[in-house]
Amino acid sequence: MNSFGEKLRFSTFGESHGKALGCILDGVPAGLEIDEAYIQSELDRRKPGKSEFETARKEADKVEILSGVFEGKSTGTPIAMVIFNTNQKSKDYTNIKDVFRPGHADFTYFHKYGIRDYRGGGRSSARETAARVAAGAIAKLMLKELNISVMSGISEVAGIKSEKFDYEAAKSSIIYALDSDKEQAQKDAILKAKNDHDSVGGVSRVIVSGAPVGLGQPLYYKLDGVLADAMMGLNAVKAVEIGDGVLSATTLGSQNNDEIRAKGFETNHAGGILGGISNGEDIVMNVYFKPTPSIFKEQHTVTTENEEIDFSLKGRHDPCVAIRGTVVCESMAALVIGDMLLLNMGSNMDGVKKHYH
């Protein structure tokens, strides 16, 4: 499947070293002001080659809108966007033409499809996420009209955990660090792994503020379930927590319950979701990225003929994929919330009558 969503649905296309990649976003209501400069700024946050903490592959990631927008506003028809690749170095991958890279999708893609696109992983490359960010930027423009914001930052790198979550500070951090007191140690850990020809993992913390009560479709399209699906569908993500997540399993009910007063909830252990439906509090997620599998140490593997070999990887890769990945988490969260908002409009007759009256 290359599509995601129900009412607000997007499909992506393209490969890491192909001519271009892009997306088609369907379901955007007509009349939304499409700020192309904003969409580009979102792609600039995710694009590679900005610092020593990212891959050296430099791509402009210039987005071009092909359809669905007229005189600066959405027309209600599918919005197609394309991003051309300009800095492929496919020759860096010729040495792995018949080799499965440990930790990558090479092995499973080959055995599923019987075809080996060795150029940077082809469709399984995180390069595909640029298209998701383009779609997510339009979803964010929708949410802005309703005073809903989606923010994120890096809360952990190589086991170095943030003790505070400053989303404004993260915007000006080259690694999107949420805790400025931990930022240097996190940077040092990334660079040490890079200099050792290795990589580290990290955690993105995502927060949605301003979402109304009622988003989510029981029982099989729950808000937390779809958010988890969206995040787990990203490259290198191995776990997702909503609210307190794993910690919830270690506490008592009297500690975990969010008690309620007239003005709202006293705590937010649930992460803004109860019974799969938003409760009006901030929606909070932790998204766990494994270390980038592309490392430059000699490793054991097999070829497409199942021959055991030792090999060393070449190319340009992120020493910590979570850094740019956190921007993609934001985009996917925005797309899910946008989808849920459109689905929720017809959840009761009052809403239907209000629309048609």
Image: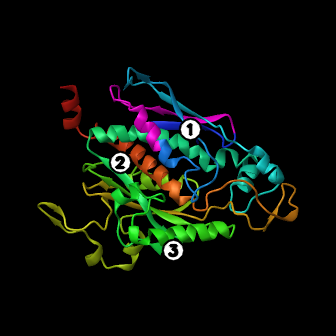
- Colour scheme in use: rainbow
Q: Is residue 297 left or right of residue 24?
A: right
Alpha carbon distance from label 2 to label 3: 35 Å
Image quadrant in which you'd find residue 296: bottom right
Mark 3 falls on what kind of element?
loop
Image coords of residue 45 (percent x, y)? 48, 48
Magenta stretch contains residue 26: yes
Quarter of the image that includes the C terminus: top left
Residue extending farthest to the left is 262
Query: Is 131 rendered above or below residue 218?
Result: above
Q: CA distance from mark 2 to mark 1?
A: 25 Å
- Disc nearest the viewer among 2 and 1: 1
Give the CA separation, mark 1 to mark 3: 33 Å
Number of other residues with Cα within 10 Å of mark 1, as a class: few under 14, some 14 to 19, many 20 or more: many
- The magenta segment: 18-42
Q: Residues within 10 Å of mark 2 (few under 14, many from 20)?
A: some
The residue that label 1 is drawn on is 12
Residue 207 falls in image quadrant: bottom left
Q: Amino acid at mark 3?
A: Gly
Number of on-image labels: 3
Q: To which quarter of the image does residue 241 belong?
A: bottom left
Name the residue tied to disc 2: 217
**Residue found at x 61% / y 71%:** 192
Residue 159, numbered label: 3
Q: Tell me the kind of residue under disc 1.
A: Thr
Which one is closest to the eye, mark 1 or mark 3? 3
Residue 126 screen position, x and y as percent = 60, 50
Q: Is residue 354 visible?
A: yes
Quadrant containing the N terminus in the rendered view = top right
Q: Is residue 52 magenta?
A: no
Asked whether residue 115 is in view, the answer is no
